[in-house]
Amino acid sequence: MHTRTPLLLAHVFGTALLAGASLAQTGADTQPAPTPSAPPPAHVPAEEPIETPAQVPRVETPGQLVPRPGLSEGLTLDLTPRFEYAFESSLDDSDADVAVARAGLILNFGLPINERFRMSLNTDVEASNYTFDSGPAAGAFDDPFDNVYRFRFSPGFYYGVNQRWGILGGGIIELAGESDADVGDSATYGGFVGARHAFNEKFALTGGVQVKTRIEDNLLFIPIIGFEWNVNSRVTLSTSGPGFGLRLNAVLNEQWSFSAAASWEVRDFRLAEDAPIASGIARDERVPVIVGFIFKPKPAITLSLYGGAIVWQELSLDDSDGDEIAEDNTDPTGIVGFSASFRF
């Protein structure tokens, strides 16, 4: 697996974190101390109240696999269906094109144990269809697989030590492959641990590590570099999912918001015994950059429509032991998607 992409993103995120923390702390240090003032006379209209800064947004569960730290909420259920389509793109060194359609559903339960401790149960089911249009010189990429599936279950917890500090952790169980692939050979496992610190109401930082096995490959270490920064009452900058990403959100009015995001995503799938590469492994790494609009008709309903481009993607095929057979990059291509979120 190439490590340059995640390391580059980690460097960019680290720089953003340092800048955000510095700006947030500078703003807090330079605020003048409040001075008491007498109420205005009855015949003089009072000044318009100053808008209260938005609270630090929650860490996104699907992105960093971190439970929501909203300890005051009761039992919650978030239902998030999604669909996206990556348009056909040519492989650089193989006589083949590929298009990817993907649909998924996330179920996230939040369960408060007490005023400090909260559990979460995150389940993510995803189905992907890879359509290869192969020529006579496609080689190993001559229709190597088509429909693959992924099931991920991640129980987690968040413990609020005090108003500023919190501890989080959890586990990961994932099955990924073709429908006829061996279940035991399709399973991977992992976990995450970290801590969250809110510097003030505008900036919070989450740091930790996520470790996960891969199908016939080395352990995958992903740093949890989660941060939430309320730039102002309308604009937030935070880490996001799926994978390892960064998201900017701007509130336009009470119902509409604009968002822009970039992320690094990695998926491994075990192939079936009767596949062209018997019991092999298909790997897909990519970096999508997207922009979109978010519509919130009611507090418990969120609808998102987005589009953009996959600016980098690498597909590789390994044999059943994990030895590489073929690897190729795709040309940049467009992507469109839709997601919704319902809270019960």
Image: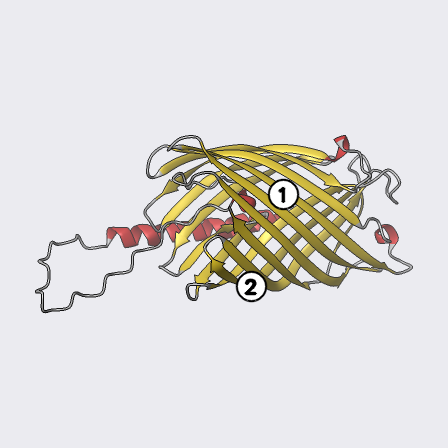
Q: Is residue 187 above or below residue 250?
A: above
> In terms of depth relative to the viewer, which is nearer, 229 or 3?
229
Residue at the image point whose x is 53% and y is 32% from the top:
170
Q: Is residue 64 above or below residue 293?
A: above
Q: Residues within 10 Å of mark 2 (few under 14, many from 20)?
A: some
Q: Decide if residue 192 is in sight here.
A: no
CA gap, disc 1 to disc 2? 23 Å
Q: Residues within 10 Å of mark 1 (few under 14, many from 20)?
A: some
Q: Is residue 6 above or below residue 212?
A: below
Residue at the image point whose x is 56% and y is 51% from the top:
8
Secondary structure beneath label 2: strand
Q: Is 275 left, or right, of 311 in this rendering?
A: right
Q: Is 112 left, or right, of 321 in this rendering?
A: left
Residue at the image point whose x is 82% and y is 36% from the top:
320
Name the front one of labels 1 and 2. Answer: 1
Q: Is 202 left, or right, of 225 in this rendering?
A: left
- Residue 268: percent from left, percent from top: 71, 43
Q: Which amino acid type corresponds to the residue marked 2 in the rendered image? A: Val
> In terms of depth relative to the viewer, which is nearer, 149 or 327?
149
- Residue 331: percent from left, percent from top: 72, 62
- Residue 93: percent from left, percent from top: 80, 58
Q: Is 301 left, or right, of 91 in this rendering?
A: left
For mark 2, what is the residue?
A: 291
Q: Which amino acid type corresponds to the residue marked 1 in the rendered image? A: Asp
Residue at the image point whose x is 75% and y is 63% from the top:
88
Going from N to C along the chain, the mark reached first, 1 or 2, is 1
Q: Is residue 62 above or below residue 134?
A: above
- Residue 81: percent from left, percent from top: 62, 51
Q: Decide if residue 117 is in sight here.
A: yes
Q: Residue 124, labelled with which disc?
A: 1
Secondary structure beneath label 1: strand
